[in-house]
Amino acid sequence: MDRRRPHKRGHWPVHLALALISALMLVPFYWVLKTSLTGENIFAYPPSLLPHDPNPFYFVDVWYAIPFLRYLINSVIVSIMVVVANVFLNAMAGYALTRDFPGKGATIMLFLSCMMIPFQVTIIPAYLITAKLHLLNSYFGMALPLMSTIICIFIFKAAFEAIPHSLVEAARIDGVPDWQIMFRLIMPLTKPAIATNVILSFIWSWNSFLWPLVVVRDVNMQTLPLGLSRFLSVVEDTTGALYAFCVMVLVPGLLIFLLAQKEFIKGLTSGATKG
Amino acid sequence: MAERAVDMAAAPLGAAAARPTFWARRRSRELGLIWLFLLPSLVIFLLYRIIPLVWNVVLSLEFWSPYRPARFAGLYQYQNMLFYDDAFWKVVGNTLIFMASAPIGIVLALGVALLVNQQIKGRGVYRTIVFMSYPVMTVAVGIIWQWLYNEKVGLINYVLISLGITNRGIPFLESFQWALPAVILASLWQVIGFYMIILLTGLQSIPPNLYEAASIDGASAGQSFWRITVPLLKPSLFLCFVVGIINSFNAFDLIFVMTGGGPGHATDLLVTYIYSTAFKLGHFDYAAAMTVANFVLFVGLAFVANRLAGGEAGAVKRRA
Amino acid sequence: MKWSWLNNRFTITFGTILVLVVIWNVYISFHDHGLIEGRVVGPNGAPVAGATVTLSEQSLLVNQERGKTTTDLSGHFRFTGHHMHRPYLHAEKEGVGQFGPHQYPLYFQGEDLILKQPLKLTAQAS
C-alpha cells in the first residue's frame, strides 16, 4: 500500500506538462477576466495580453443594467429546489435499485434509455405538460424537469452497494425500520455520493438556459442565464460588461465546486468502479 | 450483496410454508416501499422524457400543420428523411464525428489523469484547474471561444501568425473544414475536466499491489498499462462515454452561439438540425421523425459502448 | 462538540460572504446621497466662478440631463440626489472654455463623490 517511493528528482517533467496543460485550460478564463476588467474592444488588434487600465466598473454596470439581484435570487431558489429534490429522489431511486424486484431489469433499461433523449427535443411536449399542470412561470415548474438525473441515480446505487451489508443486516435484525435504516445509517455513509449529486445538479440547474427560456414569460421570474439575453439588448458596450456578466454567473458554480470537491471526487469513486 | 440478503429474506417464503403470511406481507411491504421510492423519479422521467418521446413518435407518423388537423402519414416522414434529405445524412455524419471525438477527449483526459495521479505536490491544484471549465455556462463558453477563433482579432490566429505558421488568419468558424473541429475543440475544453476526474478516481481505485506484482514479474510500464490499467478502467471509461453523450446535448448551446449551424450545415448536429427544422421552418412532424432517429442512434451507440466496456455497466447483474 | 459546525468550510465561506454583504450594504446606506462636489478651474488653474456645470446620464438609449448648476465664487459646485452609477459632467464658461462630458463611474448608484481633481476648462478652437 505504500507508494511513497523517493521521487525527488524525476518530478519536474510532470510538473512542466501539468503546468502547460493548466495554462491551456486557463487561457479562456484569463481572457474573460481580463476583458471584464478592462472592457477593451474585442475588435482591437493586436489583442493585448496584459490588462491595461483595469477597472471594476463593468461589474457595476451589469448589476444595474438588469435586475441582477432579482435574477440572482430566482436562480438561487430554483437551484436549491433542484439540488434538494435531486438528492432525495436520486437517493431513493438508487436505493430501490439495489434491491431485487420483478421488473428491475426493465426499469434499469428505462432509466438508461431516458438518458439518450436530448433535452432540446422534448421542449414542446414538456411545455405543454407544464402548462397543463399550471406550473408555467413558477419556480416549481422551472425546477421540475431537473429534479432527477439518471447518472446520479446510478452513482447512488453504486454507493449503496458499496456499503458493507453486515451493517444493514445487523440493524435490520435489531428491528430498526427501513426508513430509519435509510436515513440514519446509510445516508451518512454515502456523503460523497451526496456531494457529487449536489455539485452536478447545482451546475446543471444554475447553467440551464433553454428550459427557463421556454417556461418563463414573466420578467420578474427569470433566472440569471436569461438575464444574459435581456442584458445584451440593453447594454451599449457589449464587451466589458458582457464578460463581467459571464464572470458573475460563473462564480457561484465554481464556488460550490471548490467547497465540495473532496467529497465530489470521493463520490465518483464508488460510481466509477462499479459502473 | 443486497440481492443475496433479499433472497435470504425471501427464501423462507418457500421453506417456511407454515408461516407464509408473515413473509409474504413483509415482502409485499418491501415491494411497496421499493416502488414508492422509485415513483417520484419515474414520474419525472415519464412526464419529461418518455411522454415527449412518445409524442415525437406519434407526430413522426403524421402530417402536421398549424392550419389543419393532423393526418396519418405512415412512414412518409421517414422516407423523406432517409431518401430525400441530403442535409439529414450530412448532419448524422457530423453527429457521428462529434461522438467520435469523445474518445479523443477521453484519451487526452486519461493522459492528464495519469499525470495528476503522480505523487507530486499541488496535484489538487492542477485537478481543480482542469475541472474549472465545466461549471461555466455553455453559452458563455460559446461566446468566449467564438472570440478566440475570430479570423481577424482572435487570440488563436494571433498566436498562429506570431509563430509564423500562417500568414493570414484562418476563418475557423466560417470555413467548411475547420468549423466542426473548432466547435469540437471548444466542447472538449469544457468537458475534459469532468472526464479527467472520473478517470482519476478510477485510477486511484486500482490496488497498487497489482503494479508491484507486475513489476516483480518483469512487466514493462507499457505492458502494465495495457494489461492492468485499461481493463480495470473499463467502468470509468463507460461512465466517461455516458458523460460524453450528455455533453453532446450541451453542444447545442455551443453551436447556436458560435455558428448557428455553421456554414451550410457544416456544424449542424442532429439536435440543432431538429431544432431549426422545427422552430425555424415549422416542420414539426419531420423534426419528430428525426428525433426518433436520433434516439435510435444514441441507443445504438450506447449499446455498442456497453459491449466494448465489458457489458456490465448498469445492466441487471445476472446471478448464476 | 456543539460549536464544531462553525469550523465547517461551508459555514466559513457563506458566513464571510454574508458578513461582507451586510457591511457593504451598511456602507452604501451611509454614502448614497447622490452627492457630487467639485471645483471648476480655468486653463491657468484659477478657479472659475459662474461656470455652468451639467450633470447628465448618457448611454446607448438615453441622453438626458439630470441637473444643472453654476459654480460659486470659489469655483465650487454641488449636486445632490442623483441616482446614477455613471454620471457625466460637463462644464463650460463662455469665453473660457469647456470640459467634458466626462464620465465618473461609481461603485453603486448615488455614491457620494467628492472630486479630487478640478474640472479644468480648456479653450476650444472652434
Image (cartoon, coloured by chain):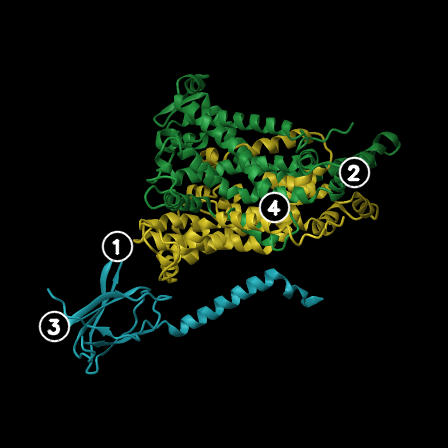
Chain colours: A yellow, B green, C cyan
Quick check: B148 left or right of B300?
left
Q: Which residue is mark 3?
A: C94
Secondary structure beneath dot 1 equals: loop
Residue B26 — which label?
2
Secondary structure beneath dot 2 equals: helix
Dividing the picture into quadrants, the one containing residue C54 is: bottom left
On the same chain, marks 4 and 1? The answer is: no
Q: Earlier in the sequence, mark 2 or mark 4?
A: 2
Secondary structure beneath dot 3 equals: loop
Q: Residues within 10 Å of mark 1 (few under 14, many from 20)?
A: few
Instruction: Name the one closer to the observer, B206 or C59.
Output: B206
Q: Point out residue A162 in the picture as x, y percentages from the top left corner.
A: 73, 43
Q: Chain of mark 3?
A: C
Quick check: A82 left or right of A184?
left
Residue C90 — which label?
none
Query: Mark 2, mark 4: which one is toward the viewer?
Result: 4
On the same chain, marks 2 and 1? The answer is: no
Q: Chain of mark 4?
A: B
Query: Mark 4, mark 3: which one is toward the viewer?
Result: 4
Instruction: Name the one closer to the observer, C84 or B187.
Output: B187
On the same chain, marks 4 and 3? The answer is: no
Figure quadrant of the C terminus of chain A:
top right
The answer to the question of whether label 2 and label 1 lie on touching residues, with beta carbons closer than 8 A, is no
Q: Earlier in the sequence, mark 1 or mark 3?
A: 1
- Three-letter code for the amino acid on which mark 2 is drawn: Arg
- Three-letter code for the amino acid on which mark 4 is drawn: Leu
Q: Which residue is mark 4?
A: B115
Regarding residue A84, the answer to whether it shows in the image is no
Secondary structure beneath dot 4 equals: helix
